[in-house]
Amino acid sequence: MLTKRYVCIICPNSCEIEVEYSEDKINRISGNMCEKGEEYVKKEILCPERGLTTTIKVKNGSLPLVSVKTSKAIPKEMMMKIMDEISNVEVEAPIKIGNVIIKNVLNTEADIIATKNINKKVK
């Protein structure tokens, strides 16, 4: 059995939560002041997720890169595969904040969305 400590980031309480678990089973969670902390730790142990922010190459843009993010958290284990997918993409300017650059990236139900406006390069 493994024991791990977390500081919950879900609410302002910042509970120090201790978890005892084995490979795929949580045996004990303690230290959380609310149910949100318990849910957070369960997800971190069994299926951690993260938001992804990065950049994508821009063709004919006023800047060479556009900042992007995922529309929702994705499984942590998919991060590098998604980064590989993104590295092969180049978008044409102009780009507006909120444009979907990649829909349903690698079947995660998350879209890659532009977070910056990029104008077309003036010649």
Image (tube, rainbow, N blue to C red):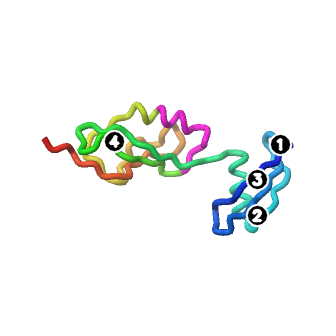
Start and end of the magenta stretch?
73-84
Rendered location of residue 121, percent (x, y): 19, 43
Q: Which residue is mark 4?
A: 65
Three-letter amino acid code of the residue under disc 2: Asn
What residue type is disc 4 on? Answer: Leu
Crowdedness of circle 2 by 10 Å Cα count: few (<14), some, many (20+)?
many
26 with respect to 86 (left or right): right
- Looking at marks 2 and 1 on the same chain, the residue that comes earlier in the sequence is marked by 1
Identify the image quadrant of residue 11. Answer: bottom right
Q: Earlier in the sequence, mark 3 or mark 1?
A: 3
**Residue 74, above or below 30:** above
Q: Alpha-carbon distance for marks 1 and 4?
A: 43 Å
Say which residue appears at 70% left-offset and 58% top-offset: 7
Quickly name the residue at label 1: 22
Residue corresponding to mark 3: 5
Image disc number at residue 32: 2
- Label 4 – label 2 distance at C-alpha: 42 Å
Residue 61 point in image, percent of width and height: 25, 42
Spatial CA distance of label 3 from label 1 is 14 Å
For the residues labelled 2 and 1, say whether their Cβ atoms are less than 8 Å apart. no
Q: Amino acid at mark 1?
A: Ser
| Residue contact at pointers 4 and 3, CB within 8 angstroms | no
Q: Compare marks 4 and 3 and give the one earlier in the sequence.
A: 3
Which residue is at 51% across, 46% downward? 52
Q: Residues within 10 Å of mark 1 (few under 14, many from 20)?
A: few
Front in this rendered view, residue 12 or 25 = 12
Q: Earlier in the sequence, mark 4 or mark 2?
A: 2
